[in-house]
Image (tube, helix red, strand yellow):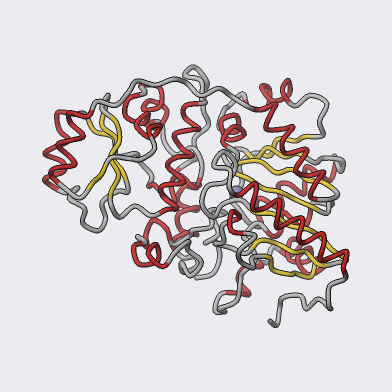
């Protein structure tokens, strides 16, 4: 490992702190309101070494598999200064690659950093009036709003500018992206995460039940099936959610895993659409939504796509119908997709079955940090 840190034997204290981080990571990673699939990442700084989650790994599996990569903190900080992409070093290697957000973790002075795609935080982070809304809800905390920046060095540099004038910051709301909280140890950071979540919590909107009439036709015509999570139907039955998603892409994971436009059809045309081209062949979307009817899933949908879709529904159900939203620009979407498309192979996907079934175009970057970012 030429470029990775080579730590000496860990002391008992260091082992204990890493164990706490694994424990925290598994807990946070198992909460679909905080982490979906391989997004989200955690880290700890131990005596000049940054231990950071590897790209593509699922935090939920932190107790079962090794996923923390040691990096020389000084080297990472130098790469932020020069703008060099840390992940590039790992382009041709089989070993674990540090998260695309390594630079962000390194520049924050706190020892433990937690980055999650909190559903509640995202529901605020996509609003034009997000900073104003949060100034009330997060009053008294050391928080900052970071306007959208692409994952990796651009985001790290944006954060660096902000914390330079507010070094006490330990909560960051990332516009069109998610949440970062920090602490001096895992316990403190997790406690702060829970407090922020409590303050940001939004009750999801109730939505009409699905109408199985049209959906049953789809199930008969092709290799599609009914979702096992009822809330997914809201994308079809909830008029506000439909309207929100017609506006564009809310955050990069949405585009990377689910495409740039939501496949939303009126009931009258859906059968002909399916007969024509949505018959389960490659290139068909992982799901379709039918106006006022509900949602059907492609049998080829991966676990990562499914987790992302569940998250997306929960965001739209928490978004006020009258809120002005800030969608990603065309350039931002293209940038996120190109990083994904040229990113890592899916060697770190969640199961061999997923690897077989991955639609390379959609999921080349399973680490929505957008972890694929990086090497070609
Ligand atoms: Zn992220």
Residue 35 place in picture, x, y as percent: 57, 46
What residue do we see at 65% from left, 48% from top? 27
**What number of labels is visible?**
0
Q: Is residue 290 left or right of residue 350?
A: left
Q: Nearer the viewer, residue 244 or 367?
A: 367
Relative to 15, residue 168 above or below: above
User: Residue furthest toward the top?
Assistant: 322
What residue do we see at 52% from left, 61% from top? 372
Q: Quadrant of the N terminus?
A: bottom right
The image quadrant that residue 236 belongs to is top left
What residue do we see at 48% from left, 61% from top? 350
Q: Is residue 301 left or right of residue 282?
A: right
Q: Is residue 294 left or right of residue 347?
A: left
Residue 107 place in picture, x, y as percent: 78, 55
User: Residue furthest toward the bottom?
Assistant: 2
The image quadrant that residue 91 belongs to is bottom right
Relative to 7, residue 312 above or below: above
What residue do we see at 83% from left, 54% from top? 111
Q: Nearer the viewer, residue 246 or 67?
A: 67
């Amino acid at each position: 490992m030429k470029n990775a840190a080579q730590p000496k034997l860990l002391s008992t204290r260091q082992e204990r702190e890493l164990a706490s981080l694994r424990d925290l990571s598994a807990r946070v990673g198992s909460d679909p309101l905080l982490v979906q699939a391989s997004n989200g990442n955690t880290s700890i700084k131990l005596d000049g070494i940054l231990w950071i989650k590897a790209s593509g790994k699922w935090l939920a599996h932190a107790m079962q598999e090794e996923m923390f990569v040691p990096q020389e903190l000084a080297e990472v900080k130098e790469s932020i200064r020069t703008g060099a992409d840390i992940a590039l070093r790992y382009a041709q290697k089989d070993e674990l690659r540090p998260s695309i957000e390594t630079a962000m973790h390194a520049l924050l002075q706190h020892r433990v950093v937690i980055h999650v795609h909190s559903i509640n935080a995202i529901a605020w982070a996509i609003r034009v009036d997000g900073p104003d809304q949060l100034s009330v809800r997060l009053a008294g905390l050391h928080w900052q709003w970071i306007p959208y920046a692409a994952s990796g060095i651009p985001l790290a540099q944006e954060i660096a500018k902000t914390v330079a004038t507010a070094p006490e910051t330990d909560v960051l709301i990332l516009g069109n992206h998610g949440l970062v909280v920090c602490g001096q140890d895992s316990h403190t950071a997790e406690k702060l995460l829970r407090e922020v979540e409590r303050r940001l919590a939004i009750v999801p909107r109730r939505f009409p039940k699905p109408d199985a009439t049209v959906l049953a036709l789809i199930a008969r015509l092709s290799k599609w099936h009914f979702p096992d999570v009822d809330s997914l139907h809201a994308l079809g039955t909830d008029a506000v959610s439909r309207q929100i998603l017609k506006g564009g892409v809310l955050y990069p994971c949405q585009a990377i895993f689910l495409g740039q436009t939501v496949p939303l059809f009126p009931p009258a045309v859906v059968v002909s659409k399916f007969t024509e081209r949505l018959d389960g062949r490659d290139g068909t979307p992982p799901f379709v939504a039918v106006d006022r009817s509900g949602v059907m899933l492609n049998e080829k949908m991966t676990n990562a796509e499914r987790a992302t879709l569940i998250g997306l529904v929960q965001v739209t159900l928490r978004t006020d119908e009258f809120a002005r939203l800030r969608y990603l620009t065309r350039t931002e979407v293209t940038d996120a997709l190109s990083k994904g498309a040229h990113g890592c192979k899916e060697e770190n996907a969640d199961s061999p079955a997923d690897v077989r079934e991955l639609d390379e175009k959609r999921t080349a970057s399973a680490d929505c940090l957008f972890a694929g970012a990086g090497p070609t």
